[in-house]
Amino acid sequence: MSAVIPALVVMGVTACGKSTVADAIAQGIGGRHIEGDQFHSAASIAKMRSGVALDDTDRAAWLELLGALLAAAVAAGERPVLSCSALKRRYRDALRAAVPGLGFVFLQLDRAEVQRRVARRQCHFMAPELVDSQFDTLESPVAEPGVLTVDATLPVAQISRQAVGWWQARC
């Protein structure tokens, strides 16, 4: 029997579909989507808009806040689904420290598809020139426990069903 997963993080590089998939999973599980991008500081958003990648210092308070939001939602009996890049192992571990047993859905996508998606996006603060920095920062979570890896080119409904089934099998 697998460990109980109290909450999920839908993670991956920019434009992989984190928000859309997290929303679909939350609807499918009767949970609540927490949009990680809504909690970036104004300074971090300005930095990304100008084409400058965030560093560990920029992300520290943001990850702490997201972990606290997840922990509070779990404590309130909710089933939260956070959309958050969580690109490095230490970022995922910070979230795991806030919510033991936290699960991750890794939306895996290649660089060419990400560049295509970013070029089509409008009104998003992530500058297209940051795609390379996202891949440079990414530490694949594939071998970590509590991670479901999904092909992000699949239809959202299919990804959501797969993730919901995986999560329900661990509740």
Image (spheres, rainbow, N blue to C red):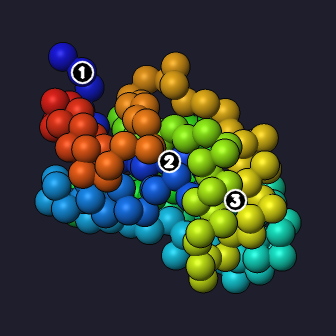
Q: Residue at x 50, y 47 (%)?
A: 11
Which quadrant, please, contains the N terminus? top left
- Numbered mark located on residue 59 in the image: 3
In the picture, the quarter occupied by the C terminus is top left
The percent coordinates of residue 51 (x first, y second) are 83, 69
The answer to whether 152 appears left or right of 81 in the picture is: right
Query: What numbered label is drawn on residue 11?
Result: 2
Q: How many marks?
A: 3
The image shows residue 26 at horizontal and vertical percentages of 24, 59
In the rendered image, residue 73, in percent from the top left (x then y), is placed at 30, 62
Give the class, few, some or many, for how many residues have Cα within 10 Å of label 2's Cα (few <14, many ≥20).
many
Q: Nearer the viewer, mark 2 or mark 1?
A: 2
At which x and y percent is residue 81? Answer: 33, 56
**SS type, badge 2:** strand
Q: Which is more toward the observer, 145 or 98?
A: 145
Q: Which residue is mark 1?
A: 2
Instruction: Give amino acid for label 1.
Output: Ser
Instruction: Identify which amino acid the numbered label 2 is placed on.
Output: Met
**Does 49 appear above or below 94?**
below
Tell me if mark 3 has few (under 14), some (14-19) or many (20+) residues whose alpha carbon lies within 10 angstroms of its own: some
Callout 3: helix, strand or loop? Answer: helix
* Nearest to viewer (mark 3 / mark 2): 2
Q: Quadrant of residue 149?
A: top left
Disc 3 to disc 1, C-alpha distance: 31 Å
